């Protein structure tokens, strides 16, 4: 079997960097199980020449397999191990745009970019066949999108991204950023801002941007969509049609108020209550075979509680061994984990 060595990207977040190797190893295991037919084996941490790497073995990786592995969230460089030598392997990422689309926007509470990419990757691996991941045409929803890190990562892949955000300041900041970034990059685009109404009542403010990576794609109407709505996530079902999305990914925020408009109860900051109300709404928006990937704070909601909510909404929790080892500390008040569930 051929051995490979992956150099892990340095992370600006020191806390995440401490667990990056374990997280990346489990991401590789998810890829192997769900999109590589188990062709990657013996994923281990190793030190080569005094430098830490992740190593793995395979005897049958194709060009398509390498294109999939090129998008691992923490991959910095990939090598084939030849005795005591490392032979670089060219990586062909899906990325259509400069990485400042992901990194340039800084704000308090921003989810680590590498983790955001990992969450999107493992959710896609569960829901989509390899050619679909590489071929595009994927629709992603983040129903608690904040200032759009997950939306930008989906756009990097050439996918269409849709978001719902209850905080008006975050909505306005993200809508302004996307349009400014496209102008700075001189990318052809068109943007529309309007009110969303259902049954004569306002649901929220809405910004939709259509754009393309090249002028040729724009002329041919080969467009990507970034769309964000300023509304409560519990109204997502009023904004989007049922079975519209291949993937739903979100990092459940902490201390953000949500409540169903038709409910008499007051807005709540309790994450468990928010998720209990939101998950059935989100599940209706998934296509059959699609998947939802959630990250959340274990100090507020246990894994069995969240798994039960997903199952009650008609979703099947993916409980492969790697999915039980993504727990990691963010800060003193947040111990984060992720869970992925597929729509039957």
Image (tube, rainbow, N blue to C red):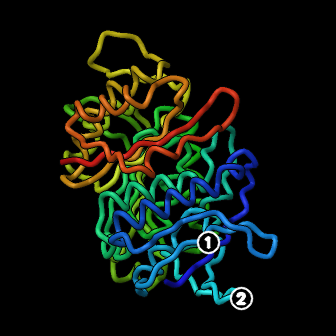
- Residue 40 location in percent, x, y? 45, 72
Residue drawn at 46 percent across, 32 percent down: 166
Q: Assign a secondary structure to mark 2.
A: strand
The crowd level at tag 2 (other Cα within 10 Å; few <14, some 14-19, many 20+) is: few
Q: State the residue in front, 342 or 106.
A: 342
Q: Are marks 2 and 1 in contact (CB under 8 Å)?
A: no
Q: Identify the residue at horizontal 57%, vertical 54% (top origin).
A: 23
* Residue lying farthest to the right in this orientation: 50
Identified at 58% across, 79% down, the residue is: 4
Under circle 1, the secondary element is loop
Can residue 79 be seen here? The reply is: yes
- Measured as percent of width and height from the top left, residue 317 is found at 30, 42
Q: Quadrant of residue 7?
A: bottom right
Identify which residue is drawn at 51% across, 23% down.
300
Whether residue 109 is situated above or below residue 217 in the rendered picture: above
Mark 1 crowdedness (10 Å alpha carbons): few <14, some 14-19, many ≥20: few
Q: Splitting the image into 4 quarters, where does residue 110 fall?
A: top right
Q: First in sequence: mark 2 or mark 1?
A: 2
**In the shown orientation, is residue 14 left or right of residue 203?**
right
Apparent side of residue 11 relative to residue 114 in the rendered image (left or right): right
User: 237 or 16, which lies in front?
Assistant: 16
Residue tagged by mark 1?
98
Q: Which mark is residue 146?
A: none
Give how far across and how far down residue 167 sits, in percent: 52, 32
Residue 85's mark? 2
Percent position of residue 190, x then y: 44, 65
Relative to 18, does residue 275 appear above or below in the rendering? Answer: above
Residue 95 visible to an observer of this rendering: no
């Amino acid at each position: 079997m051929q051995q490979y060595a992956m150099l892990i990207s340095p992370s600006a977040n020191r806390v995440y960097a401490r667990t990056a190797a374990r997280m990346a190893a489990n991401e590789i295991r998810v890829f192997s199980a769900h999109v590589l037919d188990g062709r990657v084996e013996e994923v281990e941490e190793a030190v080569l020449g005094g430098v830490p790497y992740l190593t793995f073995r395979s005897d049958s990786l194709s060009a398509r397999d390498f294109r999939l592995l090129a998008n691992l969230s923490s991959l910095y460089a990939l090598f084939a191990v030849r005795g005591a030598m490392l032979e670089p392997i060219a990586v062909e990422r899906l990325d259509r745009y400069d990485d400042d689309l992901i990194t340039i926007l800084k704000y308090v509470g921003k989810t680590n970019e590498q983790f955001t990419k990992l969450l999107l990757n493992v959710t896609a691996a569960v829901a989509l066949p390899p050619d679909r991941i590489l071929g595009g045409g994927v629709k992603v929803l983040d129903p608690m999108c904040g200032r759009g890190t997950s939306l930008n990562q989906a756009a990097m892949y050439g996918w269409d991204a849709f978001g719902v955000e209850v905080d008006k300041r975050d909505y306005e900041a993200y809508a302004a950023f996307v349009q400014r970034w496209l102008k700075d990059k001189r990318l052809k685009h068109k943007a529309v801002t309007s009110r969303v109404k259902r049954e004569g009542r306002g649901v929220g403010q809405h910004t939709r941007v259509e754009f393309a990576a090249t002028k040729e794609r724009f002329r041919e109407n080969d467009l990507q969509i970034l769309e964000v709505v300023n509304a409560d996530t519990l109204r997502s079902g009023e904004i989007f049609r049922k079975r519209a999305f291949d993937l739903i990914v979100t990092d459940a925020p902490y201390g953000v108020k949500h409540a169903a408009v038709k409910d008499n109860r007051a807005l709540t900051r309790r994450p468990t209550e928010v998720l209990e109300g939101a998950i059935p709404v989100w599940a209706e928006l998934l296509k059959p075979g699609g998947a939802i990937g959630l990250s959340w704070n274990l100090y507020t909601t246990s894994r069995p509680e969240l798994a039960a909510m997903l199952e009650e909404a008609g979703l099947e929790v993916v409980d492969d061994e790697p999915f039980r080892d993504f727990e990691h500390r963010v800060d003193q008040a947040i111990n984060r984990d992720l869970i992925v569930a597929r729509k039957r």
